[in-house]
Amino acid sequence: MVESFNGWLFLILYILNWAGGAMYAYQTMFNTVPWLSKYGIHESAVLPTRVLGTFVSAGTLLGLYILFVGPEGTWPFFIFNFLQALIFVVVGYTTVTNSNAAKLDGVNYTAEAYIAPAIFTVLNGVLIYGLGVKIW
């Protein structure tokens, strides 16, 4: 397993990246109402949040599969994760700083909306670079 990820560093980074996705998958699928409440979002957003959670969960399950079989030939997975996180940095920042939704009474959007995806962007970029020989 360690060799297929080009050593401990990239294996640990991969697991951290996967665990972050797993955390969001759990929160959006199974801990939905408390997660929404944390940001002051009405419970009526449960269904769209869980729809989002299905995408995150699918990526998390695919990532778990890659962990055990190795990353050979999985460049679309890494590129998708990188691009999704990068786009979310922009959308999250714009939403938190300039949207009407962020100004509604009781809504508590935080910098997590762009800081977390920025971390995922960097992690995925480092993984793409470090695993380049394996994933392409």
Image (cartoon, rainbow, N blue to C red):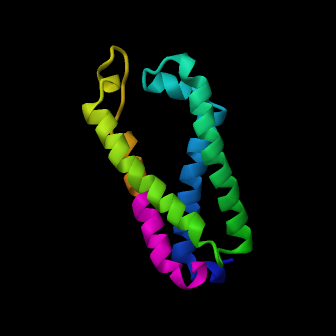
Quarter of the image for residue 133 reads: bottom right
Quadrant (top left/top right/bottom left/bottom right) for the N terminus? bottom right
Question: Which residue occupies 65% across, 78% down?
Answer: 72
| 56 lies above or below 18 | above
Question: Which residue occupies 65% across, 35% down?
Answer: 29
Q: Horizontal placement of 11 versus 123: left or right? A: right
Question: Which residue occupies 51% across, 25% down?
Answer: 36
Q: Which residue ends up furthest to the top in the rendered image?
A: 105
Q: Horizontal placement of 131 versus 62: left or right? A: left
Q: Which residue ends up furthest to the left in the rendered image?
A: 98
| 128 lies above or below 96 | below
The percent coordinates of residue 76 (x first, y second) are 58, 67
| 21 lies above or below 134 | above
Question: Which residue occupies 62% across, 26% down?
Answer: 47
In this view, the residue in front, 78 or 68, is 78
Say if the magenta span includes residue 124. Answer: yes
The percent coordinates of residue 97 (x first, y second) are 26, 34
Quadrant (top left/top right/bottom left/bottom right) for the C terminus? bottom right
Say if the magenta span includes residue 53. Answer: no
Q: Horizontal placement of 34 versus 62: left or right? A: left
The percent coordinates of residue 16 (x first, y second) are 54, 60
Prevailing SS of the magenta stretch: helix
Quarter of the image for residue 93 reads: top left
Highlighted magenta segment, given as a residue range: 120-136
